[in-house]
Image (cartoon, rainbow, N blue to C red):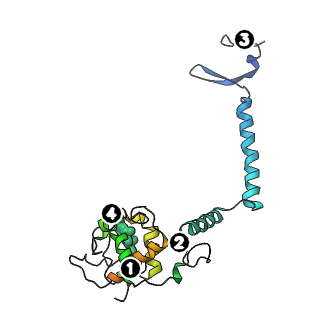
Amino acid sequence: MEEKDKNLIFDDEQDKLLNHEYDGIQELDNPMPPWWLYGFYFTIALSVVYLLWYDVLGIGPSQSEEYQREMAAAAEMYGVDPGAAPGTTVDYAALEILTDQASLDAGRIVYTNPAQLCVTCHGANAQGLVGPDLTNEYWKHGCDLPSLMISVKVGFPQQGMPAYGSGSRLTDLQLQQLASYLISLRGSNPDGAKAPDMSRSERCEI
Ligand code: HEC
């Protein structure tokens, strides 16, 4: 009979002892702890359900479907879709440029309102500071009324312009007045106008 290893504590350990040793360290062939094993089985079972649910049967939405849903929800919430069905949001594309003095004054008040910060980045006369000059013919995101409203509403966070300039919300009417006011400034050639940024490659008539 084999001689019992003096390091072993329990009787059955002799059978479990694996036939290797490194630097005096020996290994017993013990089973995996049950909690670990069941956790592993659970992930296997879950992966089958996941595969069926999302890929085989297609019950769950795919990544692109989720993206579409989120975009539709955002369009509904912020009205960024100009052609949105009437009743859900204002159809910006159908709005007219306001030219009456009262509306232009209202637009100017929004533009110069410190809470909106437009002046901080575009200058008191929209001549451009950090942001581009808004009075010349060079535009990047469209120069018609709906495009301007959407530009202000959504902002360009990557380029440094928050939504509504400062994140402080404006109504659709205020956006319309603001955009109309900006259009009225077009070609005004204000003092100190910032040099046109040629990446704003869309040319608008002034
Ligand atoms: C923190 C700075 C900042 C503030 C505040 C800000 N803007 Fe801007 N704005 C920018 C920058 C920078 C751009 C250029 C974005 C780009 O190049 O894509 C821009 C672009 C725009 C454009 C689009 C220009 C184009 O070429 O299509 C409009 C319109 C505009 N701003 C209007 C406004 C109005 C109105 C306000 C106030 C409600 C405002 N901005 C507040 C920095 C600002």
Label drawn at residue 4: 3
Question: Is residue 139 in sight in this rendering?
Answer: no
Q: CA distance from mark 1 to mark 3?
A: 102 Å
> Tag 4, which secondary structure?
loop
Label drawn at residue 80: 2
- Mark 3 or mark 4, which is nearer to you? 4
Q: Nearer the viewer, residue 8 or 24?
A: 8
Kind of residue sitting beneath label 4:
Pro
For the point 30% across and 85% down, the residue is 187
Q: Residues within 10 Å of mark 3 (few under 14, many from 20)?
A: few
> Tag 3, which secondary structure?
loop
> Which of disc 3 and disc 1 is earlier in sequence?
3
> Which of disc 2 and disc 4 is earlier in sequence?
2
Q: CA distance from mark 3 to mark 2?
A: 80 Å
* Residue at mark 1: 102
Asked whether disc 4 touches disc 2, contact meaning CB atoms under 8 Å apart, the reply is: no
- Mark 1 or mark 2, which is nearer to you? 1
